[in-house]
Amino acid sequence: MAGYIEDRWLNKTKDPTTRRRERTERWGKGKRYKVAGIPGVRSRSFASSEDAKAWLKKAATTKAEGKFVDPRDGEILLADYIETTWWPGTDYPPSSRSAVRSRVTSHIIPLLGHKQLLEIDYDVLTLWRKALLSRVSPASARAVWAHLNSILEAARKARRIPENPCREHRELKPVPTVKSKAKAWPREVVDGIRVGLTARYRVAVDLGVGLGLRQGEVFGLGEGDLDWAAGMVYVRRQLRRDEQGRPYFCLPKGGKIRDVPIPPRLSASLRAALGAHSPVPTTLPWQNPEEPLTDQEAKARKPVTVRLVMVSSRKQPVHPDTFNRSHWKPALEAAGIIERLDHKQLPEVTWRRAKKTYGDTREHGFHCLRHTYASVNLEAGENPVTVSKWMGHASVKITLDTYGHMMPGAGAKGLAAMDTWFAAPPRKFLPQRSPGVGQTRRPPSPQLVAAGVGRKTSLNKQFKRVNFVEEPDATEE
């Protein structure tokens, strides 16, 4: 077994005169026994030889199995590990970094940052989960749990901890409330929202409900993506912003570029909109707005110029926060979908803007236009696979899980089949080897009986009776 134990208080060799091991300069100082010599494992000292022997055996065995974890590496505080190791090594998209950073610094570091990595176990997770659910909704708590799981999984792979407690105790993972089904808007609601927007932004409603584009895809759509001759729209990019609000282009969600057919009347409406508000050439970096530090980053982030179909009144890329706050929500209010809060009944806060505050409007976001697009196509009987392709879903399963209830007569065929099953008259049960319905057993013919008797007689004549003599046991003499 690799490794050895060194007694640091006594010399290894005996004195030739006294034949005794002399004391070293470290006599009585620090821990006496040092375990060393295991390849790839730092030495460690112990006060007793028993502890040193146990550590040597365990360390050598787990190292040979490739499972060795030095407890000292897990003694780092969670907050320090996040700041010095985990966060610098993450590769979240620029548009997501701000949200991830906010969840980690608001709900993980304040509640668990004072714990060492090795101290985070079932009991610690249980108390943290309870405190977390008192702060945020179950859905948000589930997202925070995912971040902590990512942090601890990175620590496990770096061999700072033997196991990831989030994976080991998955039953503690917050369960979100029942997700409501996607809701589509009727035609009059969509028209009401469209009228409530300024003329410049009405094209966003047409693109959302007519092509199923996401908001970022609408803001990143270029004039060159509209193929009038083929009647297609090529969804090749979306417009995003990083945590500092800097715009950039990137691929659509999940990298799913796609082609979506344009309805003829929508084509005419888009032509009219482009005639009233000419596309504006816009040059933005690709994938990341940060200044490149290497030639490879410069190549990957090379700016792209697009004649944007939709821009702000200042001829700039549309900022989603500004659009939602100053245009989308007032249009929802004009359509009678949401109402402004009564500020007289709200607590006094310094950050609230008068006349611009509404209640929780997440269920009435721009994405509802996409739900409406799916609803119209599925209710018309369009193949779910085709709808999934047009919407850029990763699989048709997502389409069916989200919009299956919108399909006409969903479940009606199965209901009718079961009803037919029970409408049929009961059938007589027959054992597996019984003759079928209408069949009867017939006695064998005399010819077959005679043939069987003759065959048996013939076989008996071929063999003579043999008397077997038992052999003595081999052990007997």
Image (spheres, rainbow, N blue to C red):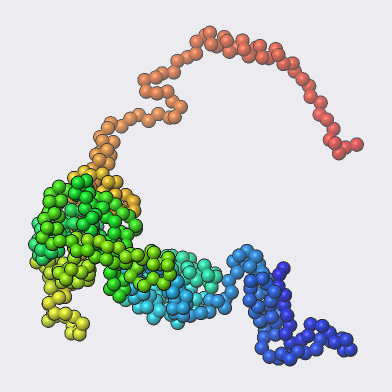
Which x, y percent locates residue 146? 39, 67
* In the image, residue 458 above or below residue 284: above
* In the image, residue 452 above or below residue 290: above
Q: Which of 111 and 209 lies nearest the eye of the viewer?
A: 209
- Viewed as shown, does residue 334 lie left or right of 303? left
Q: Residue at x 18, y 80 (%)?
A: 352
- Viewed as shown, does residue 119 lie left or right of 471? left
Which x, y percent locates residue 301? 36, 66
Residue 136 shows up from this direction: no
Residue 346 shows up from this direction: yes
Which x, y percent locates residue 308? 21, 62
Q: How many numbered marks have been drawn onto this rendered protein structure?
A: 0
Outermost residue on the right side: it is 477
For residue 21, what is the image quadrant?
bottom right
- Viewed as shown, does residue 10 lie left or right of 76? right
Quadrant, the N terminus? bottom right
Q: Residue at x 64, y 71 (%)?
A: 40
Which x, y percent locates residue 288? 35, 68
Q: Which of 336 and 277 lies nearest the eye of the viewer?
A: 277
- Viewed as shown, does residue 160 lie left or right of 379? right
Q: Residue at x 46, y 27 (%)?
A: 433
Quadrant, the C terminus? top right
* In the image, residue 295 above or below residue 424: below
Q: Residue at x 31, y 71 (%)?
A: 242
Q: Which of 12 and 432 lies nearest the eye of the viewer?
A: 12
